[in-house]
Amino acid sequence: MINDNPGVALVAGGAGFIGSHLCRALIERGHEVLCIDNLQTARPSNLRTLEMLPGFTFVEGDVVNLLPDAVLRMADQITRVYNLACAASPPQYQADPEHTMLTNVVGTHHLLRLAERAGARFLLTSTSEVYGDPEMHPQTESYRGWVSCTGPRACYDEGKRAAEAMTFDYARMGRAEVRVARIFNTYGPHMSPDDGRVVSNLICQALSDRAITIHGDGSQTRSFCYVDDMVRGLIALMESEFDGLEPVNLGNPTELTVGDLCDRILALTGGSRDRVIFRPLPQDDPRRRRPDIARARDLLDWSPSIGLDEGLSATCDWFSRELGSPLPSLAAPARPN
Amino acid sequence: MINDNPGVALVAGGAGFIGSHLCRALIERGHEVLCIDNLQTARPSNLRTLEMLPGFTFVEGDVVNLLPDAVLRMADQITRVYNLACAASPPQYQADPEHTMLTNVVGTHHLLRLAERAGARFLLTSTSEVYGDPEMHPQTESYRGWVSCTGPRACYDEGKRAAEAMTFDYARMGRAEVRVARIFNTYGPHMSPDDGRVVSNLICQALSDRAITIHGDGSQTRSFCYVDDMVRGLIALMESEFDGLEPVNLGNPTELTVGDLCDRILALTGGSRDRVIFRPLPQDDPRRRRPDIARARDLLDWSPSIGLDEGLSATCDWFSRELGSPLPSLAAPARPN
């Protein structure tokens, strides 16, 4: 359903992986989109594609700093503020942990103040990382998590927890209408080949002649959501009518081991299992991760519709074009889920 | 042991309850003390007493903002940075949750940058609140806590967790030597009568003609550390030689119920149990709290030495002078522990 004049949606981090898909979807729904991004993890090609769309405006800026005048000037037209600003893969967010923490806390603060000033609804993309290495499985939103606040992942995990805390305080104080999404692993076209996440790592390694790296023994589980499903969930959450005082898990509850993920990618790319090597698990790496999405089903009538084989096939396809490594013919037709 | 020239100690929050005791103790050890405080929870009488001490300088300022020039100008003389800046009782820190979060994250960031610039050692006063409503009892430093990041206490609890994360990142990056203390309930003279904490509440109510309020049924437990012990622990931690990459619990492991605490205070003040009324427990109030202080014993050779009766007696004595409500003679001699 397309609203005739839904106003301007500000998307912080809109040149990143999920952000760029979100910008496109918002424009398709009739929004003008104002994207602010510091280009820390953005892919120039994502941005170039977006800039060809009517109604898309890009402002380079870092939400850690005061928001640029180009954003503030448009405050009275902004109806929605989507905060996706933060590097999300461990190698990227650990490269400058101070900046990661400030992006989450100070950046969220700046964007909340903008939402208050604009009278806009604010959506924070939080993360399954707020559950840490969970003892409860699958994870419901009421689970408080098992997070180390002293370790090398804390800049991101605790930064997001603090951003949630501030967001809910804004809602309780009546300063902004808020929505908080806890995003679980998401994959799809336009991921950065070098962002260090397991899907992009495995696909890029499989498509090249390099060794294929599995951390740990591959028995740790993950649940992967295709990016189109995620973007649909984010917009559904933003447009949902409830008090917004609770976070909502968004992710695909189909759980598989990293070893099984690797096998499926090898099947799609024609890679050989002989190239797989095993490396130690990083510190505080979660063993299991699967969202309980009952709340999203109830509140938003949302659940993922794209199965892993379909999604992985489209993703391998995109990476193979991006990297110039043609897929073997056996992988060409997408297998329906 | 007094160092001949230990340099300047910056104490952020030095006009508050623990801060003012710490400033005095640092001056007694030969430090010059530069106190920065926004006077949010400070008592003017604490500050007036400190300002009579040689070597004490007060600068009014809020660590959320850039540090005042008066502080930055002294950077090359600062050898120690103690960060005690944040209101610590729920009514106070919940009055402005946005400011509470920013004090912990942005304030800690500003003070860490100062420590880096000064080449000073930095100590963060974190809190037992990082354990939330703990499922592990007593709490060791390795326990990751049971904290709600969505509720009304999160501005403080998650703010402190985020401050810890950033502090340890500074240490891992080699940008500052750090120490992190997790402070459990502390009491003593110079508490604010209206700070809303259980010891000051009960004593002030008992010394007045008002009702004596217990939240819940009084069966929840706490462990109370006398402020002199706490200050000794903080200085011992700051001056200890270890890598600083782990937090250290500081508190008194003697656990008692809030009901028992109330009875002891009534005995010291001559108040009557008939005046006790029961109120609902606030949201997310922890049921039990007791520090495991094995790490502090091992690393710092520290443990509390002042028993509850001795400490409560001195505290009641101070409050009775402060409030002009004389204690009954039966409570006059301090009972040794």
Image (cartoon, coloured by chain):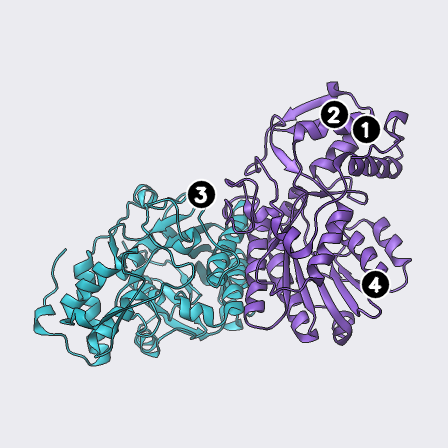
Chain colours: A cyan, B purple
Q: Nearer the viewer, mark 3 or mark 2?
A: 2
Q: Give coordinates of residue A53: x percent, y percent.
A: 31, 73
Q: Secondary structure at mark 4?
A: loop
Q: Give coordinates of residue B166: x percent, y percent.
A: 56, 63
B22 above or below A88? above
Quarter of the image where one finds residue A230 = bottom left
Q: Nearer the viewer, mark 1 or mark 2?
A: 1
Q: Amino acid at mark 2?
A: Ala
Residue A314 falls left or right of residue A51: left
Q: Nearer the viewer, mark 4 or mark 2?
A: 4
Q: How far separated are the C-alphas under marks 4 and 2?
A: 46 Å
A156 above or below A139? below
Q: Residue at label 4? A: B2
Chain bearing tag 3 is A
Q: Residue at label 1? A: B268
Label annotation for residue A243? 3
Q: Residue at x 71, y 55 (%)?
A: B234
Using a 10 Å C-alpha cutoff, classify the residue at mark 1 as few (fewer than 14 neighbours), some (14 to 19) or many (20 or more): many
Labels 4 and 2 positioned on one and the same chain: yes
Q: Residue at x 20, y 58 (%)?
A: A308
